[in-house]
Image (spheres, grey):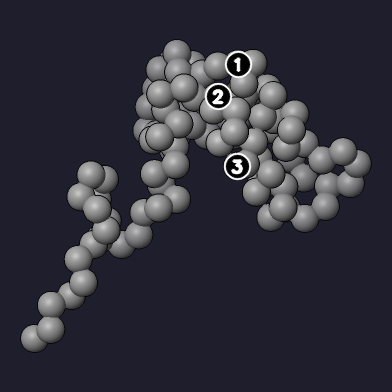
Amino acid sequence: MIALEVADLVIIASRTLRLDTGLVLDLLDPAAAESALAQARPDSEPGDPVAAAAALLHALVRERPLQRGNQQVSTPRRRRPGWRPGCGPPAAPRPE
């Protein structure tokens, strides 16, 4: 399993948020990012990648390393076809 570093989080956040890396760095709390990464690192064996991803997500939500960007980072996982930010869920199709 790949061990992520703070620089990796910057790149991931930059691509996810579609922001310049400089802006992501302005949003980043390096201590909170390092703490989240340390909490998510496996103690011994790499183990289950799904569990590792869940541990990382949980640590990122708890530590909030992106300050104002935290709300934006959580948005992509809620998206589904037809959904647009700020518009709520897609409407049910109308019967014809």
| Residue 95 horizontal/vertical position (percent) | 12, 84
Image quadrant assignment for residue 68 = top left
Q: Residue at x 26, y 45 (%)?
A: 85
Element class at badge 1: helix
Q: Residue at x 19, y 66 (%)?
A: 91
Pick the residue in front: 94 or 26: 94
Quadrant containing the N terminus is top right
Classify residue 42 as left or right of residue 69.
right
Q: Which residue is mark 2?
A: 65
Say which label, 2 or 1, has the lower sequence index.
1
Classify residue 17 as left or right of residue 92.
right
Q: Residue at x 27, y 58 (%)?
A: 89
Element class at badge 3: helix
Label 3 and label 2: CA atoms lie apart by 11 Å
Q: Which residue is mark 3?
A: 57
User: In the rendered structure, which amino acid carries the disc numbered 3?
Assistant: Leu
Q: Tell me: residue 48, above or below residue 27.
A: below
Q: Which residue is mark 1?
A: 30
The number of discs equals: 3
Classify residue 37 as left or right of residue 80.
right
